[in-house]
Amino acid sequence: MAIQSTTNQALEDLDATSTLEGLQDVITTLRDAFGIDHMVYHWVDSAGDQYGCGTYSDAWRDHYIAQNYLRLDPVISGCYQRFHPVDWKRLDWSSKSARVFQAEAIKFGVGNQGYSIPIRGPKGQFALFTVSHTCDDEEWLKFTETHSRDLILIAHFFNRKALEFEPNRIPDQSRALSPREVDAMTLLAMGCSRAQAAAKLSISEHTVRVYIESARFKLGALNTTQAVARAMSRGLIVI
Amino acid sequence: MLRYVYANQLHLYPKLAETMFRDRAGQFRDRLGWDVSVDATGAERDEYDDLCPLYVIWEQADGTHGGSMRLLPTTGRVMVNDVFGHLTGGAPITSPLIWECTRFCLAPGAGGNVAAALMLAGGEVMTGFGVRHFVGVFDARMVRIYRVIGSSPEILGSEGQGRDKISVGLWEFTSQSQAQIAKRAGLSPELSRLWFNRAFGGEITEQMALSA
């Protein structure tokens, strides 16, 4: 519960911030809440400019840039133009340069485990959200299996914020709840189960679950309880 | 076998790609009568093929296409929101945990086992990538056929009449029904997992290079 409330507050802060420093504070808080070594979010905007926030040391970041590791980092090549999350163990580390790079990363405290989520935004914008840690394979598998969906959502919440920083951006209409999403969230707020909500709306429970999933993302929440609370506090649903 | 191929990797499988786009023309233009574009080489392609989607393709023993579907996350441009937004509740369905599945296609003569294999792949994607739902565009006349296989889409809304009727709905690729679908596909769940892992670089237990 402690993790949940910290995370929930951090995501509220993320929604509210309008500065890079704000992103940095949120990502540090989230890293601590998840109890891992690092969390990093890095993006390239539609004009090709790069930005980032995260908890890697300045020494590692400077070393990475100085060595131009971008060109041989298997995480970069393995995530480019993809949209599925990638455990670092699934990448190709077989070349000598990749192994040297990996040893350096571990030396600089990145950790021996990693999980990266590539994101494709509009007009060529793209981003990479990464968590990394030092632990054995079993522990890491357990961590990623437990948290993968939350991490995917958080990655996209960061990206949605980054898109607000785009020059000449068109206001984002994609966060408006559809009438069906409002219906489903309203019934949940009134205490209905998903099955009851489905019956009242004369749609299947599966359909209700999709509307709730979509609403949850639009509201920037990781779970349904948070999503209902946010929808109410923003006046999007009235009971 | 099942292959998972992003659009920018299709050139590695020229025969598979060529026959897939040709079979799509056969299914969507010739058999279903949809208003789709077919180029001079006989390939059916649309603008979503240019967004680097992930294709799941059943490859036959001779290297040709046996069946396929096309996946894109609903956080980007997708057909269900661009074209059929009015059928899905009046505003876009958007979540990185909801992916779109379109152009579900079977080669002429491909049996229910191929469709079942594709369903099995949908389950692998859900488990492997954290996807919770697939929303899709399909021909309503196919629903009965899908049901026979043991997994049919649930219709959210339809548009058009007769031959032009196109539906938007939810694909149920539940991991609970994996064993049953695997049986219909004539595949073991282990083999299906192996193909998925191979596609995404996964002999995960064998590669200990990163272990502490």
Image: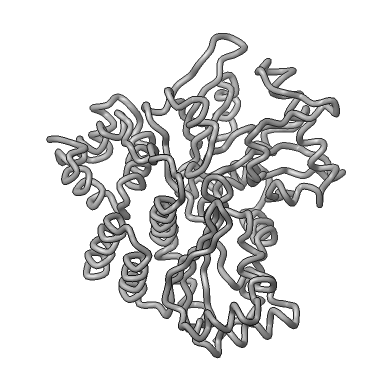
Horizontal relation, residue A111 to residue B102: left or right: left
The correct choice, above or below, for A9 with respect to B10 in the image is below
Q: Quadrant of residue A193?
A: top left
Q: Quadrant of residue B143?
A: top right
Locate residue A20, reporting x and y percent: 38, 65
Q: Which colouring convention does the figure follow?
A: one colour
User: Quick one: A83 or B162, which is closer to the camera?
Assistant: A83
Q: Residue at x 70, y 46 (%)?
A: B7
Q: Residue at x 63, y 39 (%)?
A: B70
User: Quick one: A213 or B49, which is closer to the camera?
Assistant: B49
The correct choice, above or below, for A137 with respect to B41 in the image is below
Q: Residue at x 33, y 31 (%)?
A: A178
The C terminus of chain A sits in image quarter: top left
The N terminus of chain A sits in image quarter: bottom left
Locate residue A231, reporting x and y percent: 22, 43
Locate residue B87, reporting x and y percent: 43, 23
Q: Residue at x 64, y 38 (%)?
A: B69
The correct choice, above or below, for A145 with respect to B207 in the image is above
Horizontal relation, residue B118 to residue A179: left or right: right
Would you say residue B128 is visible in this rendering? no
How many circles with numbers are drawn on the protein? 0
What residue occupies the far front of the structure in this picture? A168
Would you say residue B191 is visible in this rendering? yes
Locate residue A12, reporting x and y percent: 25, 57
The correct choice, above or below, for A148 with respect to A35 in the image is above
